[in-house]
C-alpha cells in the first residue's frame, strides 16, 4: 500500500530545489540504559524533545529468503567517537536490543510525528577494528514472545534490585527477590510479588 506522509512532506517532496534535507534518525535501546539518539547528519539536531548526535551510518536493502527466515537489513555504523562500543560491551554484544528508525525533514522538526517509523531487533553484531560496527536488524521474532505476557508469582519479586520500582537504597548488594529477603531488608512495602495468589502463580 502507498506510504502515507504529511502535507508538509508532500510539499517538500514536490519542490524543484531546496536547501533542506530528509534526515534518517536512529534510537538505540539497550535494557536498563537510556536510549541513544543519532542522526545521519553533520551536526546535532533536536527533534521530539531529544538531541540527536551526528553519526556516520548506512542501511542496506531489506534481505528476504525463501526459507521463511526473519527479513533483515544491515546497519553499518562508523563509531569514531566510541559512543556505541561501551553499550555493546556491557550487554555481551547487544543482541536483542531495539533500534527504531525514523525519517523526518529538517524544515519541519517541530512535527513530532515522523514520516516513517520502523522498529527492529538486533539479531547479530559484528565489530571490525573497533570502529566499524555492523548490526543485523530484523523484525521481532514471535517465537521469543512470552505467552501469556505476564506471570504473577507468590514468592518472587518482579522488580530489579535497587531499581526505582524496587525502591531499596540501603547498603546491601544482593537480593534473591523473595518476600523473606524483602522483609529482611525492611522493604516489604515495595515487594513486587503477589503473596495472595496460589503456589503455582497466575498467568495473564
Image (cartoon, rainbow, N blue to C red):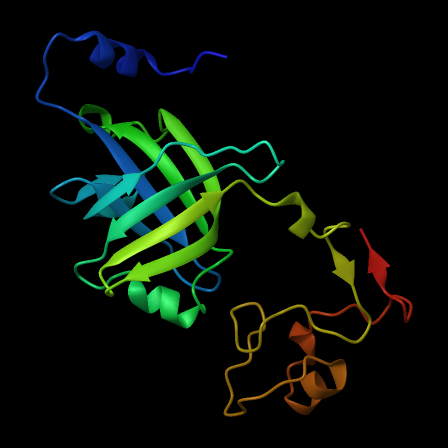
User: Which of these two is toward me, 24 or 10?
Assistant: 24
Q: Is residue 132 left or right of residue 93?
A: left
Q: Quadrant of residue 93?
A: bottom left
Residue 184 higher or lower than 160, as above or below? below
Q: Is residue 148 left or right of residue 21?
A: right
Expressed as whole percent of the image width and height from the top left, the position of residue 68 reads: 63, 36
Q: Residue at x 44, y 59 (%)?
A: 30
User: Which of these two is toward me, 169 or 125?
Assistant: 125
User: Which of these two is toward me, 121 or 163?
Assistant: 121
Q: Residue at x 33, y 43 (%)?
A: 26
Number of numbered tags placed on the structure image: 0
Expressed as whole percent of the image width and height from the top left, the position of residue 164 reads: 51, 69
Expressed as whole percent of the image width and height from the top left, the position of residue 15 reads: 16, 8
Q: Residue at x 51, y 32 (%)?
A: 64
Q: Residue at x 65, y 73 (%)?
A: 190
Q: Is residue 18 left or right of residue 39?
A: left
Q: Quadrant of residue 25?
A: top left
Residue 42 higher or lower than 151, as above or below? above
Q: Is residue 192 left or right of residue 204?
A: left
User: Which of these two is toward me, 198 or 61?
Assistant: 61
Expressed as whole percent of the image width and height from the top left, the position of residue 191 reads: 69, 74
Q: Residue furthest front?
A: 66
Q: Quadrant of residue 141?
A: top right
Amino acid at each position: 500500500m502507498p506510504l502515507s506522509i504529511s502535507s508538509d512532506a508532500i510539499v517538500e517532496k514536490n519542490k524543484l530545489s531546496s536547501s533542506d534535507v530528509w534526515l534518517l534518525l536512529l534510537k538505540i535501546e539497550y535494557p536498563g540504559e537510556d536510549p541513544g539518539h543519532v542522526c545521519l547528519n553533520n551536526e546535532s539536531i533536536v527533534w521530539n524533545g531529544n538531541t540527536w548526535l551526528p553519526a556516520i551510518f548506512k542501511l542496506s536493502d531489506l534481505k528476504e529468503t525463501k526459507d521463511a527466515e526473519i527479513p533483515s537489513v544491515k546497519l553499518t555504523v562508523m563509531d569514531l567517537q566510541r559512543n556505541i562500543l561501551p553499550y555493546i560491551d556491557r550487554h555481551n554484544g547487544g543482541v536483542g536490543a531495539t533500534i527504531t528508525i525514523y525519517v523526518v525533514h529538517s524544515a519541519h522538526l517541530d512535527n513530532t510525528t515522523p514520516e516513517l517509523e520502523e522498529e527492529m531487533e538486533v539479531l547479530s553484531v559484528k565489530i571490525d577494528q573497533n570502529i566499524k560496527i555492523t548490526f543485523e536488524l530484523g523484525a521481532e521474532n514471535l517465537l521469543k514472545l512470552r505467552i501469556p505476557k505476564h506471570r504473577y508469582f507468590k514468592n518472587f519479586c518482579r522488580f530489579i534490585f535497587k531499581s526505582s520500582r524496587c525502591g531499596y537504597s540501603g547498603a546491601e548488594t544482593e537480593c534473591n527477590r523473595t518476600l523473606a529477603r524483602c522483609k529482611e531488608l525492611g522493604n516489604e512495602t515495595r515487594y513486587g510479588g503477589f503473596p495472595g495468589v496460589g503456589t503455582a502463580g497466575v498467568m495473564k
